[in-house]
Structure formats: structure tokens, C-alpha cells
Amino acid sequence: MIRRKVTDLQILNCIYQYTVAFGWAPSIEEIGRKTGLTSKGTVFIRLEKLEEAGFIKRMKNTPRALSLTATGRELATGVRQSD
């Protein structure tokens, strides 16, 4: 079986597309399912790193409380936000 590496961009795209489609952020389980990450712990760690890098914002201990920052949205969509 060939494993593909899930990139941060794939996670950002997942968050963006899910939020546009449903009006709220995906759960950790949904991000894992959409990106092929099988461990919730791995998804959680990746989200922490994206938050530290300034690509997403999260409210701790609240389900689905994450959103893309302007920089994260630019990476996910490929469209630069005007000032």
C-alpha cells in the first residue's frame, strides 16, 4: 500500500471547502476522513502547528471552533486578499 503525505495545504483546503459547503468548520474526525489521516491525534497536532504558524484560529475545548486566518484563506484558495 502506498501512503501519501498529507500536506498542510490539503488540511487548509479541507477546512475552507467544508466551511463554504456547510457554514461551519469540520470536526477533527471529518478533517482526518477527508485528508486520509487515520489518527485524531495526528490531526490535532497538525492543527496546533497550523495555529502556531498563524494559518488558523481555534477556541480551545470547543468543538468545530476553528477558522482560517486571512493568510490561511489565501493559501487555501490561491487568492490574495486585498487590504
Image: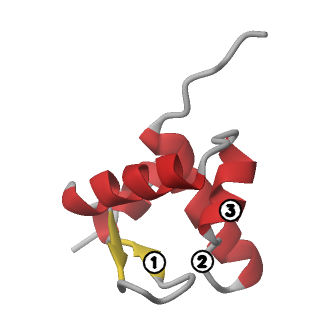
- Residue 34: give x, y in percent of width and height: 73, 50
- Residue 64: give x, y in percent of width and height: 56, 82
Location of mark 1 (residue): 66
Say which element carries label 3: helix
Relative depth, front residue between 82 and 17: 17
The quarter of the picture where residue 20 lies is bottom right
Image vertical order of residue 15 relative to residue 43, above or below: below
Is residue 59 something that shows in the picture? yes
Say which element carries label 2: loop
Say which element carries label 1: strand
19 sits to left or right of 60: right
Relative depth, front residue between 54 and 4: 4
Image vertical order of residue 6 relative to residue 44, above or below: above
Give the residue at x 32% y 69%.
70
- Residue 8: give x, y in percent of width and height: 44, 42
Q: Amino acid at mark 3?
A: Glu
Which residue is at the far top? Answer: 1
- Closer to the observer: label 2 or label 3? 3
Marks 2 and 3: CB-CB under 8 Å? no
Label 1, label 2: how far apart the Cα atoms are = 6 Å
Q: Amino acid at mark 1?
A: Leu
Marks 1 and 2: CB-CB under 8 Å? yes
Q: Quadrant of the N terminus?
A: top right
Location of mark 3 (residue): 29
Number of the label disc, if any, that sits on residue 25: 2
State how the image is colored: secondary structure
Q: Earlier in the sequence, mark 1 or mark 2?
A: 2
Give the residue at x 63% y 20%.
4
Image vertical order of residue 39 relative to residue 23, above or below: above
